[in-house]
Image (cartoon, grey):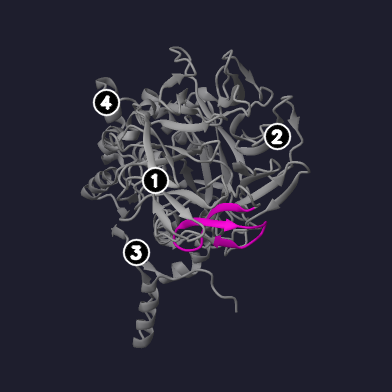
Amino acid sequence: MKKRQHILFPLVLSICVLLAAQGVPKEAVIGPPDSLVTDGIPKLPASLVEKAGRYNENRTAFPADWHPVRREMLIGTRFGNTYQAHLVKMPGGARQQLTFFPEPVYGGAFHPNGGDYIVFSKDVGGGEWYQLFRYDLATGESSLLTDGKSRNVLGPWSTAGDRIAYTSTRRTGQDTDLWVINPADPKTDHLLVQVSGGGWEPQDWSPDDKKILVLEGISVNESYLWVVDAATGEKTALTPRNKGEQIAYGNARFSKDGKGIYIITDRGSEFQRLVYLDLASKQMKPLTHKIPWDVDEFALAWDGKKIALVTNEDGLSALHLLDTETGQELPAPKLPVGVIGGLFWHRNNQDLAFGFTSARSPYDCYSVDTTNGKVERWTTSETAVHTDSFAEAELVHWKSFDGKTISGFLYRPPAKFTGRRPVLIDIHGGPEGQIRPDFLGRSNYYLNELGIALIFPNVRGSTGYGKTFTKLDNGFLRENSYKDVNALIDWIGAQPDLDANRITVTGGSYGGHMTLAVSTFYSDRICCSIDVVGMSNLVTFLEHTEGYRRDLRRVEYGDERDPKMRAFLEKIAPMNNVEKIRKPMLVVAGKNDPRVPVSESDQIVAALKKQGTPVWYMVAKDEGHGYQKKSNGDFEFYAAIAFLQKYLLQQNGNEDTSAGSSASGPGTH
C-alpha cells in the first residue's frame, strides 16, 4: 500500500487514538496549529484532511543564482515548513539543503569570486524587516551582516565581486538609503547616499565599479534612473522628470563597455519595451519595437553579447534571445505554454537558467543551452496528486459597464460534474498585478473534488494590457474596478454551464479589498466571500501601512490627506458600509503584516460580528502579508473548504459535490 504523502496534525492523531480507546463512534476533529488564533471557525472534521490533504502536498522550486565556477544552481524550495536555500549540482540532481531556519529563505546570491559563500536575506514572522546574512559553504555557518532592526533589501554585486549595494531604512525607518558592504568584512558596511522615499533600488554597477545605477520608484507608472558615484555618493539624474507623460523604467543594466544602459521602459509606448540608452547622447534606441507586448524581464550575458528576455503575450510567456551587436533576434527554444521568470546567465555565457510553470506543472528550475537550444530540467517538484488531468486555463473576455473589454482565465471542473457549476471568483492583488495561467496548487481541489469553476479576472488596473489600462482604477476611478467584477457576474449568468446563483469571491491584499468591496456593494449577487489580508478602509490602511511604502501607495489609491480624496475613500470604504455586507465571510490575516495591518481585518470582523453577519476569522501570530509557513497554509485551506461547503455548495440541506449531481437550480443565498 502506497504511503500517504500528507501529514495529519498531531491533534488529529491524539483524538483518533482517544476515541478508538473509548469505543466512541464520534468523528475526530482538527483544530488550528498553535500559531493561529481563530474566532468563529468550527471544529473541522478529520475526514476533511483525509480527502483534501493530498492537494496540500506539492512544492515548487525557483532559480536564485548560478555557481560562479561550477555548473551548479542555487535554488529556493521547501521540504519542511518553510522555503530554504538549496544547491543542485546537475540537472535532475538531489536538492542539497543549505539553510535550516524556521523563517523562509528564498535563495540568495553567490560570492562571484569562487562561490565560497552566499549572501541571503531573511525576516522574522513575516514582518518584512529583512536582514542580510552571509552563509559560508565550508562551515555551514550563517552570520548577520546588517543591524538586525531595519529593513534591508539585497542589491547587485560589484563587477569585481568584492562589494554589494543594498538599501536600508536604518537612518529614518522609512527612507531606503543606499548602503555598500563587503560581506567578507562586515566592518566595511557604510551609508553611501541618503535619499528621500521608500522606492529606491540599486540596479547595477558600472564595468569599472565607479558608478552604481539606481532606480527611484514613484509608482508602477512613474520612475526615474540615477547614477551614483560609488566613492562619494554624489547622484546624477539620468532620466528627465517630465511634467507631462508619466514614464516607468526598470531592470536597468550597464552594457559591457559601459557606454550605454539597457532598460525596460514604456517611454513613447503603451507597453514596456527593451531599449538601449546611449550615455553620451542620451538617445534611446528601442530593441523590441516589433513585439507588441510587455517585456517582463531581461538578462544580459556576462560577455555582453547576448540578451535573454521574456515577453508577456496575453498572460503567456515567450522567451527571446537578442544579439547585442546586431540587434537581431537569435533562435530561441520553443517552450511549452506557460509562464517563465527568473533569468540568470551562467558565466560560461552559454547556459541560461529560468523558472517555468503551467497549469499542470509546478514552478520548477530549468536551463537552456543557447548555442544549440537544448533544454534541461534541474528540479522536478513533487505533487501528491497527479497533474496530468488538471484543467487548463481558458482565456475569456466580457464587456464592462463602460464598454471596456475585460479579460480573465476560466478553469472548468471535470466533465463528471454536470449541471450549472458554482463559481469562485479569485481577484489578484497589486492592484498592479496580473493573473497568469500558472499552477493552481491546492486550488485544484475546488475544481476536481468540489466541482467549483474558478475565474481569475484581470480587472482594470492590472498590468500587461498597456499603461493606460493600468491607470484606469487610480484615485477617484477606484469604483470602476469593482464594477468590472459586477459585469463578470453578468457574464457568468449568460454561460450555460455556470451558476450565477452560487458565486463566491476571494482575493488577497488588494484582491482582499476587492473582495470586501464586492461583498459590500453586490452582496445580493454572491453567496459568501473569503477576504485574505484585505484593506477594509483605504484611509485607515494608508494611515497605518509602514512608512517606507506609504507614499508609493498614495499614488495608486489617492492621498488621504487631501480632503476631497479622503471624503471619497471614506464614502466607498467597505468598513463604512458594513451594514450592506449580508453574506457570510471568512477573513484571514497575519499579525505582523507590514503592508495591510491586521487592524484592517480586526475592524471589519468586529463590525460584522456586531451586526450578526456570520464571520469566521483567523490570525497567524507568526505571519505577515499572506501565509508562508506550510502548517498555517494547510489549516487556512481546510477552513476555506469547510466554509465553501457550508455557504456555497449546500443546497436544500444537501451538499453538491458529487460527480453527476445537478446544480442548475437556485442557491440558498
Q: Amino acid at mark 2?
A: Leu
Circles 1 and 2, Cβ within 8 Å, touching? The answer is no
Q: Earlier in the sequence, mark 3 or mark 4?
A: 3
Determine whether the residue tagged by mark 3 lies in a helix, strand or loop: loop
Q: Amino acid at mark 3?
A: Pro
User: Is residue 160 in the magenta section?
Assistant: no
Q: Residue at x 27, y 38 (%)?
A: 575
Determine whether the residue tagged by mark 1 lies in a helix, strand or loop: strand
Q: Which residue is mark 4?
A: 566
Q: Residue furthest right?
A: 372
Q: Earlier in the sequence, mark 4 or mark 1?
A: 1
Q: Which residue is mark 1?
A: 186
Q: Residue at x 39, y 28 (%)?
A: 556
- Nearer-the-camera pick, 244 or 633: 244
Q: CA distance from mark 4 to mark 2?
A: 48 Å
Q: Residue at x 33, y 50 (%)?
A: 590
